[in-house]
Amino acid sequence: MQNEETTSDERLMAMLSHLSILFGGIILPIILWATQKDKSRFVRYHALQAIFFHIAYVAILVIVIVALVLVFMIFGIGLGAMTSKGSHHSDGGAFPAIMVILMVVFYGGLFISIFGAMAYEIYLAVKSYQGSYIKIPIIGKIIYKKVYGEL
C-alpha cells in the first residue's frame, strides 16, 4: 500500500465518500471525486470505491428483488392452483401462512442487506479516516490499480 501522507481534510473527504450511503447517496462521492481527482489520489481512490460500491449494491439489490418477486409470484400462482384443484374444501389457512412466511423472509433479508451495507460503509469510513487504503473486494483492487498504477 502507499505510504504517502494524507491530510486530515483528505481523510475527512474520504470518510464522507463512504458515509454518503447514509446521506447524500451517490452524488456526494461523485462531487468529491470530481473536485479532488487531480488534487488527492487518496480521496480519488476512496470516492471511486464509494461510487462503485453504490452502483454494485443497487444493481445486485434490484436483481435479487426482481428474482425473488418472480419466484414468489410463480410459487404463489402454483400454490394457488394446487389448492383450488385439490378438493372442494381446500385449507384456506395454508396459502396465507406460507405467503406470510415468504414475506417475512423477503423483508428480513432486505432489512439485513440494507443495514449490512450501511455497516460495511461505516467500517470503510472509519478505516479511511484512519488513513487506511482498505480495498472493497473486487472493486478495490481494480480502482487501486487505476489510481496508483500498482498492486
Image (cartoon, grey):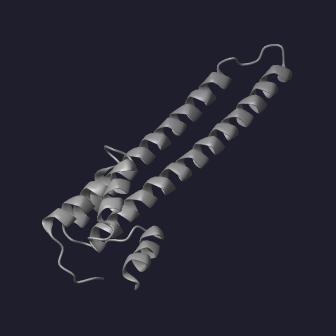
Left or right for 99, reference 146: right
Taking the spot 32% from the left edge, 45% from the top edge, the residue there is: 22
Q: Is residue 97 above or below residue 34?
A: above
Residue 59 position, x and y percent, is 55, 51
At x 38%, y 55%, the residue is 30
Tell me, yes or no, if residue 57 can be seen here. Answer: yes
Q: Residue at x 20, y 66 (%)?
A: 10
Residue 143 lies, in percent from the top left, at 43, 72
Q: Quadrant of residue 7?
A: bottom left
Tell me if residue 85 comes above or below residue 27 in the rendering: above
Front residue of this view, candidates 109 and 129: 129
Quarter of the rendering containing residue 82: top right
The quadrant in which the N terminus is found is bottom left
- Total number of numbered discs in the rendering: 0
In this rendering, the answer to whether 89 lies above or below 59 is: above
Residue 128 drawn at (x, y percent): 25, 66
Quadrant of the rendering where the C terminus is positioned: bottom left
**In screen coordinates, is 46 left or right of 54?**
left
Question: Is residue 6 found left or right of 1 in the rendered image?
Answer: left
Q: Nearer the viewer, residue 107 or 22?
A: 22
Farthest bottom residue? 150
- Report the residue at 56% width, 27% height from top: 100
Q: Is residue 133 visible?
A: no
- Residue 112 sits in which quadrant? top left
